[in-house]
Image: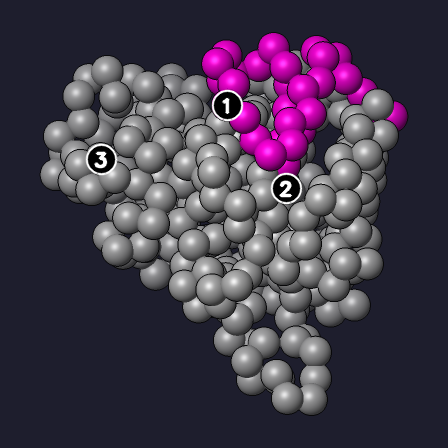
Amino acid sequence: MHAFYTDEFVLPLPEGHRFPMQKYRMLRDKVSQNLNGINLLKPNPATRDQLLLAHSPVYIDQVFRGKLSPAQQKEIGFPWSVEMVERSIRSVGATVDGVFSLIEVESKHQSHHKPHHKAAVNLAGGTHHAMQHTGSGFCVFNDTVVAARVLQQLKPQAKVLVIDLDVHQGDGTAAITQGDHSIFTLSLHGHHNYPFVKQNSDLDVALPDGTGDEDYLLQLENALSRTEQCFPADFVFYLAGMDVHQNDRLGRLCLTDSGIEERDNMVFSWLSKMHLPVVMSMAGGYFKDLDHLTDLQCASIGRLLRFSVS
Ligand SMILES: [Zn+2]
């Protein structure tokens, strides 16, 4: 299974900034030390043409040319820098390359075999707050929408499902794909959490503060079965945000380690049943204890790996 990393593209952040940039390198180290059968790769940068599948030319040029207003930079949460541009396009590129890795494998085996690889992972990504005309909430460009539409350029009939289980609503993804019936957005998120103005996903499940394993898993099971009834997906993007965990500083929900494990198992057994390929992105995670966070992320990638060869 291919895993795409972007931790070499580090953002210069002011001292004391709350974004845990070092988690990406820690995760790559753990994946390389603990998981056999993972091919760790540096992604290509997303191109301007690819970004245009989700974003307006004016906004893309503002980012590329360093013309974001102070208000726009504040909304994104990162100060503009050359490194920020590079990191943003590599992070989108990691999800796009995840798509390419599955499509390539599929075409090689097309005639007689089912594709051997059914999954790829972006060790970062899941930048679901990025809108068509602006960035927001640590998200500059929307990797999922760009990658979904790159896939649809290769396979024009493909119906794409986004399973967004990050604790924050996938508002950018929902807004950009509003009215696009070839992309179905499912978002399970904290009702009282950021973004405070929600968009309309195709299926939104808003959870109260303090939601624990049992209620969460029940809601997820219902959401997957409703999705199955109304959308014939061919390809899935899974945003596996760990910010639903009880230890997350920003999450407001109360999932435990085993709840996270069951969540993945529910998603992956549903994908197996539906014979769907998936690109997973790690999305949010803001624990104080980054060792614990990256242990959970690494375990999640291990489960994806087992799914991909099953
Ligand atoms: Zn989040």
Residues rendered magenta in the picture: 186-214
**Distance Cα–Cα, label 3 vs label 1:** 20 Å
Going from N to C along the chain, the mark reached first, 3 or 1, is 3
Q: Residue at x 70, y 64 (%)?
A: 308
280 horizontally vs 175: left or right:
right
196 horizontally vs 277: left or right:
left
Mark 3 Cα within 10 Å, few/some/many (few <14, many 20+)?
many
Disc 2 target residue: 163
147 vs 79: above or below = below
Q: Amino acid at mark 3?
A: Tyr
Question: Which residue in the rendered view is the most extreme toward the bottom?
Answer: 112
Q: Residue at x 34, y 61 (%)?
A: 44
The N terminus, quarter of image: bottom right
Disc 3 target residue: 59
Disc 1 target residue: 199
Q: Amino acid at mark 1?
A: Gln
- The label nearer to you, 3 versus 1, is 1
In the image, residue 228 lies at what x, y percent? Answer: 75, 47
The answer to whether the residues at label 3 and label 1 have Cβ atoms under 8 Å apart is no
102 or 56: nearer the viewer? 56
216 or 235: nearer the viewer? 235
Going from N to C along the chain, the mark reached first, 2 or 1, is 2
* Residue 153 location, quadrant: bottom left
The answer to whether the residues at label 2 and label 3 have Cβ atoms under 8 Å apart is no
23 or 49: nearer the viewer? 49
**Distance Cα–Cα, label 2 vs label 1:** 16 Å
SS type, badge 1 = loop
| Residue 263 showing in the rendered view | no
